[in-house]
Amino acid sequence: AQSVTQLDSHVSVSEGTPVLLRCNYSSSYSPSLFWYVQHPNKGLQLLLKYTSAATLVKGINGFEAEFKKSETSFHLTKPSAHMSDAAEYFCVVSETRGSGDKLTFGTGTRLAVRP
Amino acid sequence: DVKVTQSSRYLVKRTGEKVFLECVQDMDHENMFWYRQDPGLGLRLIYFSYDVKMKEKGDIPEGYSVSREKKERFSLILESASTNQTSMYLCAISRGDTVPSYNEQFFGPGTRLTVL
């Protein structure tokens, strides 16, 4: 069975400082991993995905994540936070079940950005 | 652009009512999903479908059923709504490839359902 743990439910940073959102996963197989973002009153949008190619994955809006198998981690980072980054972020692990894929979501990390 | 539409953004129903939530896609994707989102719990899978008239239970199917008569449309049905089904409901779609790397899911805007 697969699972995802997001280690912080809330993170607050100042604008212009680095962002680190932590995620650990558990999977029986080689996982696919994703980060999704949800802005207030909007649908979920894919930020980036890891699919067993390069371990450092670059996504949209300057975000990136590094897959570390030895640590079973997939932390999301950004060098410099912007006010528009304030949102909820979900770490997600994927496995294929039957003919369909199944995503398991973390409980989310709410990022606040202070001026 | 991928388009996943849901029939309502906000819905208020009474306990015991039958509720239909509809999801329509324009991408010709095989897989469609229904999730509910609750604070502190993330998204939890209710049902999914990988083909017309096919369905599989997700993690929390109790109290729900689904219907997929056409490829582009996937309906979630609450046979007798209860207050603990007050939640945000999200529909998602993905391609039908068996390789997980292709199975990025695209989400609709959500329906916030309140059951009184």
Image (spheres, rainbow, N blue to C red):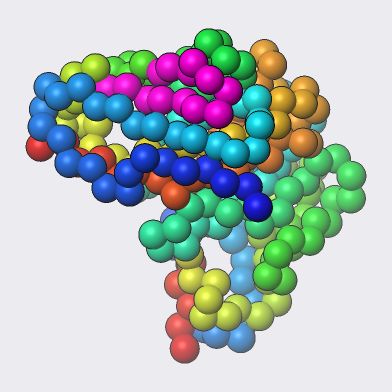
**In this view, B84 is above or below A90:** above
Report the number of numbered marks. Answer: 0
At x 17% / y 41%, what residue is drawn?
A: B12
Q: Nearer the viewer, residue A62 or B80?
A: B80
The percent coordinates of residue A36 (x first, y second) are 59, 52
Left or right: A62 with respect to B62? right
Q: Furthest residue to the bottom? A: A115
Q: Residue furthest right?
A: A53
Q: Nearer the viewer, residue B15 or A87?
A: B15
Does B34 lie within the magenta span? no
Which stretch appears magenta? Answer: B66-78
The image shows residue A5, relative to residue B69, as above or below, that is below
Q: Say if residue A16 shows up in the picture.
A: yes
> Can the viewer see residue A4 in this picture?
no
Q: Tell whether B80 sits left or right of A103.
A: left
Question: Which quarter of the rendering shows the N terminus of chain A?
Answer: top right
Q: Position of residue B88 (x, y in %)?
A: 34, 43
Q: Residue A51 placed where, x, y %? A: 81, 41
Residue B11 appears at what percent x and percent y? 23, 42
Which image quadrant for residue B103?
A: top right
Work out whether B68 lies above or below B21. above
The quadrant where residue B25 appears = top right
Q: Is residue B77 magenta?
A: yes
Query: On the rendered structure, is A55 left or right of A111?
Result: right
